[in-house]
């Protein structure tokens, strides 16, 4: 067969991931905080993109007629007034053109004017020249101080509020007094930087001396001094060491207490008999020792200021509707509000002569327009997915977690005619505020467990809730084993294996039946012991 050259035309289809398409996909899975940070970066980078206020107008006060906003800002088609997916009657028509959040970066500036009326301070002019010179110098210094305070744009009354003392700062103050040697202070500061919010150091400090270029003995010597700092128990490497430091501070670290601190695992298991044998004490002494341990602070560092956890801001609100259904709406505070300044671009296009500048501003216009539309599409997609979740899980919102249905991504994707990957991205890092609390969207997607009687499958989350209910209601004298729980679940129509019950129980951090029996017997014994004096007094009263 001879080899020849020829031209052929072929037609084929392929998916091309453009940079804008990749960015749109990325926006879907961003949380509200990450989205705000992304938009802030775009606002700094793109001169044609600007932040809008709550009225839809630009922040700088120009009329909004020359600004292009997102296409189709009305989300009423995705709102649900009921679980059947009907259009909301009071949904988004009134304010959906404000679908993007207000400016999170603006803040009111506090302006303060200091009256430096020198004529009131020095009402009379001195007679001698020396006094006049002194007077002239004094008002000048005073005026410069007052004018500097009043003309400073960054002047803020919040700067005068006392800062909250942190654990690191508190330890650093003690470090400066404890070590006159600069080398020891450097080692101490390095260890203080490793202390977490609870006041603990990492268990292994073997690499500390290598990084600092010193010996392990020097690090241990400095650590011994740090463990004497306030609060007692700080700079410990584990719980036993933390409690031992506090007991030494109280002069109560005797051999029996040392044995108790070194066997905290037995104390956690309520194995009092083994502890009594190891410590070599009787029942009364071991009770006193355990009571003293309970009065210690296992996390001494939490007394000081630390970074506060950021509260969860819901992306979607679900409220009961007037017709008995559920009304789903977006939280507009989590959606950045941006506009495209078409007026500015029109003015620039008339004055720009260089091809490079024209290309740059054309790209800025395209990117700004794309971002507005991408944010619009992101909001619509979130609302559509949330509405379908509410429709599918109507039993949960009406009657509670026991009626949570099995649900997967494919069921939602097929219902709203989207791909499973899109639904997965939308439900990542998104939260829904409901009448039963705030939940992540992924919470409503649970595996299914077959029914024992051939009926509808049960949600794994509902089964976990049922297991917890059985354990919470168990009698202290008749602790339920995993096999007994399986039998009771079978009686409720749930086909589940014993290993699955054990897995769910461990996931909820519920101890085994042996440990629960030991804990509840210990609590029951304590209650009877505390109640026995009152019982004796009542008996004495009855006898008298």
Image (cartoon, grey):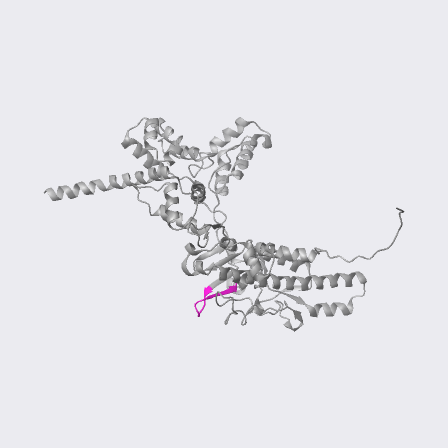
Residue 258 vs 18, above or below: the answer is: above
- Residue 419 is situated, as x and y percent measured from the top left of the image, at 61, 57
Residue closest to the eye, 206 or 264 = 264
- Residue 51 is situated, as x and y percent measured from the top left of the image, at 62, 64
* Residue 389 horizontal side relative to residue 357, left or right: left
- Residue 255 is situated, as x and y percent measured from the top left of the image, at 36, 26
Residue closest to the eye, 504 or 68 = 504
**Res 248 visible:** no
Count the labels in the image.
Answer: 0
Q: Where does the magenta region start and end? A: 319-330
Residue 408 vs 55, above or below: the answer is: above
Residue closest to the eye, 15 or 317 = 15
Q: Quadrant of residue 371?
A: bottom right
- Would you say residue 450 sits in the magenta stretch? no
* Residue 477 horizontal side relative to residue 180, left or right: left
The residue sitting at 27% across, 38% down in the picture is 525
**Res 394 visible:** yes
The residue sitting at 55% across, 66% down in the picture is 78
Residue closest to the eye, 418 or 97 = 418
* Residue 361 horizontal side relative to residue 520, left or right: right
- Would you say residue 329 sits in the magenta stretch? yes
Residue 461 vs 389, above or below: the answer is: above
The residue positioned farthest toward the left in the image shown: 544
Q: Quadrant of residue 144?
A: bottom right
- Residue 544 is situated, as x and y percent measured from the top left of the image, at 9, 43
């Amino acid at each position: 067969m001879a080899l020849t050259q020829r031209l052929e035309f072929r037609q084929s289809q392929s998916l091309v991931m453009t940079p804008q398409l990749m960015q749109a996909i990325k926006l879907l899975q961003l949380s509200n905080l990450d989205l705000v940070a992304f938009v802030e970066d775009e606002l700094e980078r793109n001169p044609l993109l600007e932040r809008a206020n709550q009225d839809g107008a630009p922040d700088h006060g120009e009329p909004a007629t020359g600004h292009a906003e997102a296409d189709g800002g009305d989300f009423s088609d995705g709102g649900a007034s009921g679980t059947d997916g009907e259009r909301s009657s009071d949904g988004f028509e009134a304010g959906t053109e404000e679908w993007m959040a207000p400016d999170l970066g603006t803040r009111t500036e506090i302006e303060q004017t200091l009256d430096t009326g020198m004529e009131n301070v020095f009402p009379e002019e001195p007679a001698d020249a020396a006094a006049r010179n002194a007077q002239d110098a004094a008002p000048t210094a005073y005026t410069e101080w007052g004018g500097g305070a009043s003309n400073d744009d960054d002047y803020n009354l919040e700067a005068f509020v006392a800062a909250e003392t942190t654990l690191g700062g508190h330890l650093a103050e003690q470090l400066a007094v404890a070590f006159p040697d600069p080398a020891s202070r450097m080692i101490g500061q390095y260890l203080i930087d490793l202390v977490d919010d609870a006041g603990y150091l990492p268990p292994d400090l073997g690499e500390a001396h290598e990084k600092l270029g010193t010996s392990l003995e020097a690090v241990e010597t400095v650590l011994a001094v740090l463990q004497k700092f306030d609060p007692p128990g700080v700079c410990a490497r584990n719980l036993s060491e933390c409690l031992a430091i506090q007991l030494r501070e109280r002069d109560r670290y005797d051999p029996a207490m040392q044995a108790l601190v070194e066997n905290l695992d037995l104390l956690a298991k309520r194995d009092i008999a083994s502890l009594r044998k190891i410590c070599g004490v009787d029942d009364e002494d071991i009770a006193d020792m355990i009571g003293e341990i309970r009065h210690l602070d296992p996390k001494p560092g939490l007394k000081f200021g630390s970074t506060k956890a950021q509260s969860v801001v819901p992306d979607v609100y679900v409220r009961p509707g007037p017709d008995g259904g559920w009304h789903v709406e977006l939280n507009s505070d989590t959606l950045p509000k941006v506009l495209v300044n078409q007026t500015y671009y029109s003015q620039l296009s008339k004055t720009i002569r260089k091809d490079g500048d024209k290309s740059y501003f054309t790209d800025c216009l395209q990117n700004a327009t794309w971002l507005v539309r991408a944010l619009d599409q992101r909001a619509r997609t979130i609302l559509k997915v949330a509405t379908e979740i509410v429709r599918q899980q109507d039993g949960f919102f009406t009657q509670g977690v026991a009626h949570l249905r099995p649900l997967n991504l494919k069921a939602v994707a097929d219902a709203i005619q989207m791909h499973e990957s899109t639904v997965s991205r939308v439900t990542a890092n998104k939260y829904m505020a409901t009448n039963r609390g705030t939940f992540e969207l992924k919470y409503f997607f649970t595996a299914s467990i077959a029914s024992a009687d051939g009926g509808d499958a049960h949600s794994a989350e509902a089964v976990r809730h049922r297991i917890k209910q059985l354990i919470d209601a168990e009698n202290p004298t008749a602790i339920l084993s995993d096999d007994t729980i399986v039998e009771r679940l079978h009686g409720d129509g749930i086909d589940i294996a014993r290993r699955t019950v054990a897995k769910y129980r461990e996931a909820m951090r519920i101890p085994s039946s042996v440990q629960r029996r030991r804990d509840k017997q210990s609590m029951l014994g304590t209650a009877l012991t505390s109640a026995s004096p009152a019982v004796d007094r009542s008996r004495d009263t009855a006898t008298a």
